Amino acid sequence: MSIPDHARANFETLLRAAADGNLALMECVDAATGTPRYVIFAVGRDGEDFVFTPFGHLAEGNPYEAYVPPEP
């Protein structure tokens, strides 16, 4: 399975934000379900304003039970 270019680009952005210390974790509400989510954001600036770009949320419970890794 190949990782799409947009996912790879987003991951590179996330790595840069982490290296620069520009990550935030915020509690948000899932727009579809209303469930609380803990979302990872890259933090930037637009003049005097902060800009928060969401990248994903932390897995609920045991992440090893939430995902199936690719087959070798």
Image (tube, rainbow, N blue to C red):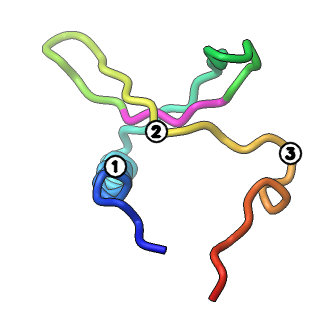
Q: For the point 73% across and 12% down, which residue is it?
A: 34
CB contact under 8 Å: marks 2 and 1 = yes
The disc placed on residue 10 is 1
Q: CA distance from mark 3 to mark 2?
A: 19 Å
Q: Give the residue at the far left of this rendering.
A: 47
Query: Which residues are the magenta region?
Result: 38-42
Query: Percent x, y for residue 56?
Result: 54, 38
In this orientation, which residue lies closer to the viewer: 72 or 18? 72
Query: Percent x, y for residue 18?
Result: 39, 50
Secondary structure, mark 1, is: helix
Secondary structure, mark 3, is: loop
Amino acid at the residue labelled 1 = Asn
Amino acid at the residue labelled 2 = Phe
Query: Percent x, y for residue 9?
Result: 28, 54
Q: Is residue 14 magenta?
A: no
The disc placed on residue 55 is 2
Residue 64, picture quadrant: bottom right
Amino acid at the residue labelled 3 = Gly
Is 10 positioned to the left or the right of 32 in the image?
left
Query: Alpha-carbon neighbours of circle 3 within 10 Å: few (<14), some, or many (≥20)?
Result: few
* Picture quarter with the C terminus: bottom right
Q: For the point 69% across and 26% down, which residue is it?
A: 37
CB contact under 8 Å: marks 3 and 1 = no
Q: Earlier in the sequence, mark 3 or mark 2?
A: 2
Residue 60 vertical placement versus 30 (above, below):
below
Label 3 sits on residue: 61
